[in-house]
Image: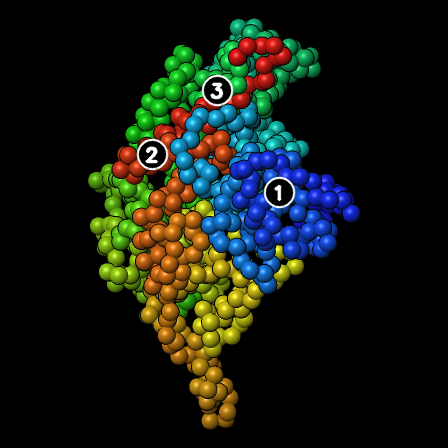
Amino acid sequence: MTRAVWLSLLAVTPILAGREPPARVADPDGAPATQFVAAHCVKCHGPDKRAGGVRLDDLPADPTKAPDRWTAVRDQVRDGLMPPAKEPRPDAARARAVVAWVSEKSGGRADKAPNRGNLIPHELLFGKPARAADPPAPRVWRLNPEAYMGFVQGVARGKVNGLVQPFVLVPERGIRDFAGLYAIDEPSTEILIRNAEAIVEVQTAHELKDGKVLAKNGAVREFVALMDPKAEPTAQQLESAVQVQFQMALGRRATADEVERFGALYAKCAKTGDRPGAAKTVLQAVLLKTDALYRSELGKPDGQFGRRTLAATELAVAVSLALGHRRDPALTAAAAKGELTTREHVAAHVRRILADPKADTARLLGFFREFFEYGGAEDVFKDKPKAFVHQPRQLVADTDRLVLYVLAADRDVFRELLTTPKSFVNYATAKNKQKGADEPKPGVVLNPINNKGQSGVESVYGVETWEPVQPVTLPANTRLGILMQPSWLVAWSTNFDNDPVRRGRWVRERLLGGNVPDLPIGVVAQVPDDPHRTFRDRLTVTRAAQCWKCHQRMDELGLPFEQFDHFGRLRTAEPVLDPEATAKNVDKKGKPLGPVYRDAPLVTSGTVADSGDPALDGPVKDARELVTKLANSDRARQVFVRHAFRYYLGRNEALADAKALQDADRAFVESGGSFKALVVSLLTSDSFLYRTAPNPPAGATK
């Protein structure tokens, strides 16, 4: 273990020098773990030698009796940091079993941070049939940036100028909209107040003409009725305005108590004599209510000990914002009528929304964008190539269309996304005004005047000409699926090179459910800048003992993608600097004329190791073989389901979610790989529908 980790344990694990180890707890289940510790840890962490000041020979067999030390052992073994490189390595299967055992005995709680979901061992979630368990705790979930803009569109019927986005997400990899990460701080509150003022100005837009107040486009009739500076609004007019704002902002009617409180607010503000201003303040206050800016998931008191069902109004918001960025009107209406109270009700509405091409289902594509992260191609700076056009925005748009094409068929979605030989290539559409329909057109068109022999975006895909009928089938034996889309390859590259390390980490985490520790503080990760060597050859620097513990989990999974260059173009050789030819490349006066390159043989092989599935482990000759193997793997599909769970439920999975995950995977398989069936299963699971209830009072009967 690292010295920092061990030292942190000293605060909770005092060293008892000179004492005999206590008798072990009689727990036969703990025998394999304690035997593992005895075989691999006690040599350096025993009664005599206590590396880092930590002793492990006295660990009880029950992790709950020494949770901090057992957790540290688990984390170090899981991340491959212990035993140290000079010591014999434990059998991988045995190490995984110990990690799983400690995780299970310690409760299997989920880590709150993004990209930490895989810390729950996969075997605990899918290794044996799961039973219903305690639901998650109640929570409130702040709107994400897109949902906030959806909220604005729902309450402002006209265009609102001057709005500022008050919310951001953490700059993490992958899925980031986790409920437990965000709150509204003081700077956000200031922005929200200014936005509310701008929204209400649009809602109450009017003009005075011949002594009458006339509404402008986008204004709300009930609100404009309060804008006459000479007229005192009636109690009924005030209540009507409050109810309309509540319905638009919160999707429900205001209670009698709320109507009374907002009426009192109006009376207090109107004392200044500015009655329209007082009305605007009331309307703004509704927009700033907690349940307008947070998703409340507390559950309704229903007399059950142990769990609560989400209230109908909570479900309406939860389902709407799981699938899109705006409240679904039919869900809101169903909640008001008491028609959103059962699992079957929720399932029917989810299916309805998914089947409606006009419904807001933007978060379907959003999941795949966050899962694959191909949108990052737009953030990777590259020098403008001379031989062809590099347009990352178009590459991303092509992949978006491919994902939507696969989702529209909704068959074998996971395998199709990884192995389809089809692609959209430089594809866009334009409205034909005469026909009243969209027609295909090239997304990027070369300028015939300034073009100096550049090939178009099509050439990046290996396609010679643009085709109006798309998707096209790409040339045989070249590309398969999203991981060989130019957008994904560029997203997981650097300015000047491929990035097999990060590509391999993506495969390890997103398809194999593994863990790779973050780069230690103070360690500079840099591949030698030796342009006369291939990237694979330069990457051998990671084979050093202190690096290989982590890099063995990544490099061999990313190197097969070396068959593409860092712009995403297929290649058969890798250009490297030819030092001798460069030295000779001079003019008559001996002035260097520039570098000369030669083609080095391209090696595209890799290895799948310690995947958790022996059928997956072994060598692969190239990216196509790697991806095909993973696409047909039960484990990779289940890991995909785990990521879908995180996206739609806004948190990492815990051991208590095993049944929800297994049910979702079963629905996915039995439906023929329908992603919609997977989503329906997740949004009707106990993990989605229920929250824990307060503990019953002493003496109460369950």
Q: Nearer the viewer, mark 1 or mark 3?
A: 1
Q: Is residue 565 left or right of residue 222?
A: left
Q: Which mark is residue 609?
A: none
Along the viewing direction, whichever of 151 and 298 lies nearer the viewer: 298
The residue to which callout 1 is attached is 70
Which residue in the protein does label 2 denote? 666
Q: Kindly report the distance in space between the C-alpha atoms of the residues bearing marks 1 and 3.
A: 36 Å
Report the residue at 30% width, 51% height from top: 419
Of the image marks 1 and 3, the number of the one nearer the N terminus: 1
Q: Position of residue 287 (x, y in %)?
A: 56, 23
Whether residue 689 is visible, yes or no, is yes
Q: Could you tell me the amino acid type at mark 2?
A: Arg
- Residue at 38% across, 46% down: 636
The alpha-carbon separation of the residues under discs 2 and 1 comes to: 34 Å
Check disc 1: other Cα within 10 Å, few if <14, some if 14-19, many if 20+: many
Q: Are marks 1 and 3 in contact (CB under 8 Å)?
A: no
Pick whichever, 240 or 219, lies toward us: 240
Under mark 1, the amino acid is: Trp
Q: Which residue is mark 3?
A: 310
Q: Is residue 333 left or right of residue 250?
A: left
- Residue 449 seen in the current view: no
Nearer the observer: mark 2 or 3; the answer is 2
Q: Residue at x 49, y 60 (%)?
A: 552
